[in-house]
Amino acid sequence: MRFLELFQYDWKTPYSTSFSDILDENGKCIGKIRKKYDNSFIRLIDLFFAGKYFVQYEILDSKDQLVFDAKANTSAFKKRQYSIEYINSNNEKVNFQVIDKKMFDIVEKTDFNINGQKYNLVKVPLEWAKLSIGENLIAEWHVPIKPPFKCKLKLYDESYKDDTLLIIGIFHTYLNII
């Protein structure tokens, strides 16, 4: 299956809070992504957790407007859970949660609902992560396991072109593996 468009961005370290430009195939910046912390104290504590406990990302569009905001619901007794707010192209806020549903498996997988539509996200080790609805592949995402970390997104379904930043945000938040 041939993808429609390729997007990419650099990711620095799990502790970096500087923006990375998200580029299309022509090198045009379509948005920016970064990790953020509520305050310096939380950032300092996160150093002890290898940058993986206080997961919070934001994505700005090409006009520097916030379109994606994700935050981990931190609890020592719960599986990974992320609350996500997305502002779509119609300027409507969409809120949803992505929750880890696997039990003791090396394959990362979850499903979640956005506006009544059930999405599936699967990441098998050493393969591209896949986002789909049923059998319909929407996108694939990949980040290398060693530096330089250049994240790539292949978009397959043209009807999701306006939601590219949402898709990148979901992959990046749920698979915050670097």
Image (tube, rainbow, N blue to C red):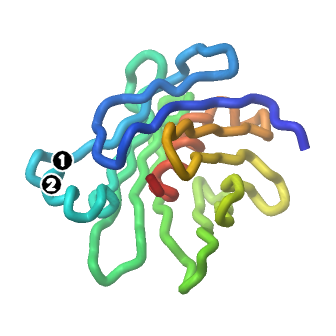
Q: Identify the image quadrant of residue 80.
A: bottom left
Q: Badge 1 is on which residue?
A: 38
- Residue 93 position in % (x across, y down): 45, 41
Q: Badge 2 is on which residue?
A: 42
In the rendered structure, the answer to whether residue 165 lies left or right of residue 32 reads right
Mark 1: which secondary structure?
loop
Q: Amino acid at mark 1?
A: Asp
- Residue 166 position in % (x across, y down): 55, 41
What is the CA distance from the residue labelled 1 to the residue labelled 2? 7 Å
Name the residue: 52% across, 27% down. 22
- Per the rendering, the mark at residue 57 is none
Indicate whether 107 appears above or below 169. below
Closer to us: 101 or 94: 101
**Res 67 visible:** yes
**Res 131 visible:** no
- Within 10 angstroms of label 1, few (less than 14), some, or many (20 or more) residues? few
Indicate whether 44 appears above or below 112. above
In the rendered structure, the answer to whether residue 39 lies left or right of residue 85 reads left
Indicate whether 76 appears above or below 64. below
Indicate whether 62 appears above or below 37. above
Name the residue: 59% across, 61% down. 113
- Residue 24 position in % (x across, y down): 64, 22
Q: Amino acid at mark 2?
A: Ile
Closer to us: 97 or 129: 129
| Quadrant for the N terminus in the image | top right
> Do callouts 1 and 2 mark residues in contact (Cβ within 8 Å)?
yes
Q: Nearer the viewer, mark 1 or mark 2?
A: 2
Mark 2: which secondary structure?
helix
